[in-house]
Image: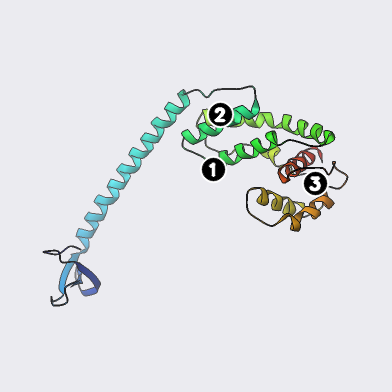
Amino acid sequence: MQGENGERLFASWSGNFYGGGYSVILYSNSPEKPFKEMSIYIHELDVFLEERYNYLDVLKNQIQEQRKSFNINMQQRKISQSNNPIEQLQILRQEIYERGECDYFEFLVEQLQMILGTPITAKENEEMVDRYRECLKPLINDLFNHVQNMEMSDIDDGVLFPKPTSLPNGYGYWLEKISDYISGAGYSPLYWEERLKQIFAGKFIMEYKSYQELYVIILACMNELE
């Protein structure tokens, strides 16, 4: 705490205890000055804390009211709509940012943009991926409605992460490794690529020009497996 003439005082351990309070020893940053003993009374602390905590409640209520007003304004502001899913996702990405950001929604948009925008090399795979992309359109509509209505809550995103039971146990571990790699973290493809090829051998044409493409093909394949 600040003393006189630029002096600074530092509190040490408690000094004496007595009915209704205790004392704190204050040492000066000037060595030649003696220490001081400051009395603190419990009832005064109670009053001080009650005032401060009540003020926090006021601040909390004001923030909640501001957020409520912001949500109403955003709900009234209509989001542009596009028949092109990729364009719609880009619109939603900007709206999510302007409406307060939501890591979960941003993740969904990024996943959908990758799945819809990644070129597919083999024609047989492209047909399968196109069927999968068609299944994702309702999810984009749900995401649109949630953002428009400022409902920053979980969406039924199961179609984005199919979970077939016909694949061998532990396949999810290897799928997670390619997902991590694509997001910029995780193990080198030398660790997981061959294992994924073994798991999905014969289920689609093993032809791809990027690991994003392989990941999208795997999701599309899983969408059609039981």
Residue 88 falls in image quadrant = top right
Is the Cβ of the residue at disc 2 closer than 8 Å to that at disc 1? no
Residues 71 and 44: in front is 71
Q: Where is residue 196 in the image (x, y as percent from the top left)?
A: 79, 51
Name the image quarter holding the C terminus: top right
Q: Residues within 10 Å of mark 2 (few under 14, many from 20)?
A: some
The residue that disc 2 covers is: 91
Figure coloring: rainbow
- Placement of 150 over or under 39, stated as above or below: above
Residue 113 falls in image quadrant = top right
The residue that disc 1 covers is: 103
Q: Where is residue 84 in the image (x, y as percent from the top left)?
A: 65, 24
The residue that disc 3 covers is: 165
Is the Cβ of the residue at disc 3 closer than 8 Å to that at disc 1? no
Tell me which residue sits at (22%, 55%) in the image.
Answer: 48
Kindly report the distance in space between the C-alpha atoms of the residues bearing marks 3 and 1: 29 Å
Kind of residue at disc 3: Thr
In front: mark 2 or mark 1?
A: 2
- Does residue 155 appear to the left or right of 198 in the view shown? left
In front: mark 3 or mark 1?
A: 1
Kindly report the distance in space between the C-alpha atoms of the residues bearing marks 3 and 2: 36 Å
Residue 33 falls in image quadrant = bottom left
Is the Cβ of the residue at disc 3 closer than 8 Å to that at disc 2? no
